[in-house]
Amino acid sequence: MKYKNNVLLVSGNIVSKMGSTLHNIALKSWLISISHNAALLGWISALTTIPMLLFNFVSGYLADTKNKKRIIVATDFVSGIVCLLFALLVNVNKIYVPLILVVNITLAICHSLFSPSLRALVPAIISKETIKKTNAVLSNLTELVKIVSPALTAYLLTIDSISIKTLFVINGVSFLLSSISEMFIDYRYKNGNSKSSVKDLFYNIKDGFYYLKSHTVLFKLIIFAMITNLFLSGYNVLLPYYGEVILRDSKIYGIALSFEAAGAIIASFFIYLSKKKEVDLNDIVKATIPQGLSLIIGAYPHSYALFISVFLFGYFLSRFNVLFFTYIQSNCDENYLGRVFSVIFTMAGVLMPLGDIIFGYVSSILANYTFVVIGGGILITTLFIFNKKQKVNQIYNP
């Protein structure tokens, strides 16, 4: 089968994403509905993210030196078992923060191992000519999951025999199914030096940093992503709080996620249809200004304004992500891919815990006007880093 690896990679990933989306929607809605406290959600998000960021450097090293296929299979399997245990132990009538943190941190560490290994595996099992289309399909289906999941979550919770615990079980099963799917990927691991030491680890991490820093385009874009993600973390905290507390409608959060996903699907669909094989970095930069403007629309306290805002936001964010990852996978040395992605995920997420905490409190104070702060922050960051046309052009010539 010509596209066997493409199908297995995408299908396995999508099944686990469906479960994870159900899990995240249920968890956030549950926390907000019981506590009515955005700050609590912000703190839990922050404390979950920090260990993942610290572990990212190790995961990049492992992705470059160990069997990538085994890593993604093992991490999906462990994630599945953890989710099933969480469903067994959690009490949905009481928030027990330590249990939530243990489960979320374990899942986050597994994700930090999974993500760079998956991204580094793509060029090794898929032809270079189909990388862009595969990324577009993966993005398209991921966003489709975001549309289906909220509606499916709402429907499942209307059934008397199904509780939030059931959604956690579904997430666990989805991870296990994904792990099974990934076992059948055709991948020949080139076994190198199996011996490794702490010295080797730090040397390889440093080597990955130097490689990345020597490529001005990537380094500039990653610094940009690091700052804007501070504000995007605020968006992730604000959205469930906005629907549940400000608009007083528990369904708003799920519907808003569906509109965001719809915008992202349209964006990735256009990218898939594009006949242009090489990624235009200028398009990546241009997608960021509309992101900021679209979020400002959400400041108007009405559900329709929110839906328009998140739809446009999803469209331009999806364009940025698909083109960004395609550029890296097409232009980065395969021997450095794992470390490069670990640095990218770490630097892009390093300010997110701070954003989770800050915007947890800001959302409670500014309410819907928090959208202005987030959107304005993205705009200012874009103008600050790319404030002159000359500078924008310069970053394309490392």
Image: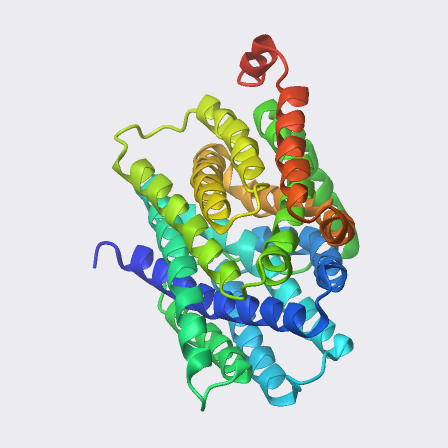
Residue drawn at the location 53% of the way across and 18% of the way down: 396
Image: 213 above or below 106: above
**Whole-percent x and y of residue 267?**
37, 39
Observer-nearest of 167 and 220: 167
Q: Is residue 167 found left or right of 349 in the rendered image? A: left
**Whole-percent x and y of residue 18?**
43, 66
State how the image is colored: rainbow
Observer-nearest of 202 and 386: 386
- Within the image, what quadrant is residue 336 found in? top right
Direction left: furthest residue: 1
Q: Is residue 344 found left or right of 282 in the rendered image? A: right
**Whole-percent x and y of residue 235?**
62, 48
> Is residue 124 among what the camera can see?
no
Report the number of numbered marks: 0
Q: Is residue 330 found left or right of 199 in the rendered image? A: left
| Picture quarter with the N terminus | bottom left
**Whole-percent x and y of residue 219?**
63, 29
Image: 274 above or below 68: above
Observer-nearest of 340 and 132: 132
Residue drawn at the location 65% of the way across and 55% of the way down: 237
| Picture quarter with the C terminus | top right
Residue drawn at the location 55% of the way across and 83% of the way down: 165
Q: Is residue 362 found left or right of 294 in the rendered image? A: right
Residue drawn at the location 56% of the way across and 66% of the way down: 24
> Is residue 36 among what the camera can see?
yes
Image: 41 above or below 259: below
